[in-house]
Image (spheres, rainbow, N blue to C red):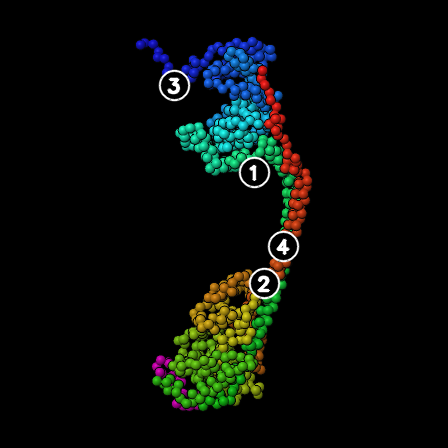
Amino acid sequence: MGGDETERQSVGEQMRAEELSRRPTAPPANLPGYQLEKFLGAGTFGQVWYGHDLNTGRPVAIKFYLYRGGVNWALLSREVKNLVHLSAERSIVQVLDVGWDAEPPFYVMEYLPNGSLEDWLRDGERMAVSQAVDIFRQICGGLNHCHGRGILHCDLKPGNILLDSDHAPRLADFGQSRMSHDQSPSLGTLFYMAPEQAQLEAAPDARWDVYALGVILYQMLTGKIPHRDVTLLQRIDTAGSLSKRLEHYREAIMRDARPSGHRELRGVDAELAAIVDRCLAPEASERFANVQQVLDALHQRDLARARRPLLLLGVVGPLLLMLATGGFAARSIVGASGRATEALRTEARASNQLAARFAARSLENELSRYFQVLAKEATEPATRRALGELLGADELTEIRELTAESAATAIPQRAEFLTHPLRRRLDAQLSSRLSRFNDDQTGRLPGISTMFVVDAQGTILASAFDTVVEESRSSSGLNFAFRSYFHGGRDDLDRDTPPTQIRPLTRPHLSAAFQSTATGLWKLAFSAPIYLSEQAANETPGGETSGGETSASDPAVEPRRPDGVFVITTDLGDFESMRDGTFRDQLAVVIEARSGPLRGTVLQHPLLDQQARKGNSLAGKRYQVSPEVLDRLLAGGDVDYRDPMAKAEGGNLYGGTWLAAVAPVTLPRELDGIRPPADRDEAEATDLLVLVQYRLAKVFEPVGDLQRQLLMEGAVTLGVLFSLALGMWWYVNRLTDASPADEPPRRTGPSDPADAPTVEVR
């Protein structure tokens, strides 16, 4: 075969060609006054042709009934009769002419060029919400006109809604329609048919058409038909008899969940969603009673949407105004509160600094009391006699010199020293003196922890304790010349320093704070020289004798070495001004001021006493203020202070932010009437700082309370104003709301079957 091969056609193209080949080329009959031009389609009973009215030139569609076998002419007659009866309504497809007695029978209706709503929604197409509502409203208007004429459509669906040149909907196909007084059943189309309609004995009801309206609106909004499912369709198709298929359909609709796809769409408001829900209610009693109620619901939705701008203006506007007013008021309150807070902080800081100076002076006064006790005990006649006898015993002098050189090589001599009667007598004397302070119930005597006497070489001769201490743990007989309480220096010397190179102090001395190895509490030692001879006792540390002779003030003259040193120690917590009381929002603590690793260490704090009373030793534990914070406090800066003791066990009570101020503690210029050295014109500074801390939240509490009260009153005022505005708006809205619920019921059709108009086609 030498020629070109014929191009192969697809299956679809072959079917299209076959369909075109079967199309009739000539109309079934020539109708006088009409020119038939083209074939539109064929159905079960005949054909539909497109043509023109020769008298008016109007395009028409002519339906020919060619197949009479099995035709229910009563139904066809009813359809034509109802179309003619509704011919005055634009929303109904118009019947222009009827040739019921012709051969073949026909009727002429207006031609609508844009097909049906079903064509538009084919393949799941959906409409914009506003467009769907507009078309739905027109469908409801046409259907309401039908109901008003006593005609129920009973088979409403997108295929029976045609679109004119303006895409306005027109109701068509009234083949299943019934008059409102009919009692004969009418079956519609699956999934557009109300569940109660799917019965062979059901009487027509306007709510059948309401249900179909809901399905159509749902389909226009979502592109889907509610409840439609392939499985259900198969079950219905295989159910057998018509009654069984209808039963399956009815039960599926009643059992299935309410459709909700429309509620998930943007633009579908609550009012529109409620209209869809009520139209699709499975129970007929829950649906709109008639189409007029659907139109009323749409009207109410329109009113609600129209009132929204008024709502914004009448409610949201005043609300925004009140909120703006409240915002400015709150801003003013907060700003004023901030300024008041700063003023209170400044005032509290100044008050704190004054309190710190006062607490420092109180501590200085108590230090003076301890020096007074020291001076009295160091000059106690019985103590001096016992010391003199001990120092005068020749057999003990050699032992004391040995222990001064090395306690490790003088163990036998130390044991002999500890048991010597003269030493025991001095022990007893010191214990007797110390018991006066321990047994004091009046609070007039200061608290003392230990009392001991050191000889001129630094060996402890005798000691007394406020608690029972075993003799094996006593420090008596050991040399402590390196301690600051012996030589009067600021810090302890190296332990290996030979005692022969260390001179004892010549005037009263306050040692640096040291930590107890047993309790962890910090202690102070007060020491003073002991001169047993009358001349030495009358000499002042400044170098002048009572007779006015020059002494140690002359550089060429060395001050006379004292016969011993008297020492008392006390816990910082024993100071009356530092004793722990009931915790308040303001408290005073003692801080170490010496440069070095201990700088900023908390020496006395209520928590230390509390832990000690519980038996919790804090030995080896230190809590320090950072150097940066301490420097700022010493410079008088405003510091948000964090108590280091808050990190200790049980210290959560001291957490948070505090205001703090510090003041140095000094020794008075004269101690118990003894004049200071000539080179010391001012009070001598100690290594102690008093820190007074005040809880910051307590400072701001009055302002916070006032601010909360003002804000609360403002909020209540705004709430009352808003409630009044809302109530007034509700009242005005109720007066102006023309709700159909308040109007008399409308008649949507003949109330009595006898009143229904009838039209006969002759």
Rendered position, 646 above or below 724: below
Q: How far apart are labels 1 and 3 at the CA level?
A: 50 Å
Q: Which dot marks residue 712?
A: 4
Rendered position, 620 above or below 559: above
The residue tagged with tag 1: helix, strand or loop? helix
Q: Which dot marks residue 270?
A: 1
Quadrant for the N terminus, please.
Answer: top left
Q: Which dot marks residue 10?
A: 3
Residue that mark 2 sits on: 698
Determine if the magenta segment contains residue 461: no
**Which quadrant holds residue 712?**
bottom right
First of labels 4, 1 by sequence position: 1
Identity, as a three-letter code, of the amino acid under mark 3: Ser
- What residue is at 42 percent from the left and 87 percent from the top? 423
The residue tagged with tag 4: helix, strand or loop? helix
The residue tagged with tag 2: helix, strand or loop? helix
**Which quadrant holds residue 674?**
bottom right
Instruction: Name the residue at the front extreme.
Output: 754
Identity, as a three-letter code, of the amino acid under mark 2: Lys
Identity, as a three-letter code, of the amino acid under mark 1: Ala
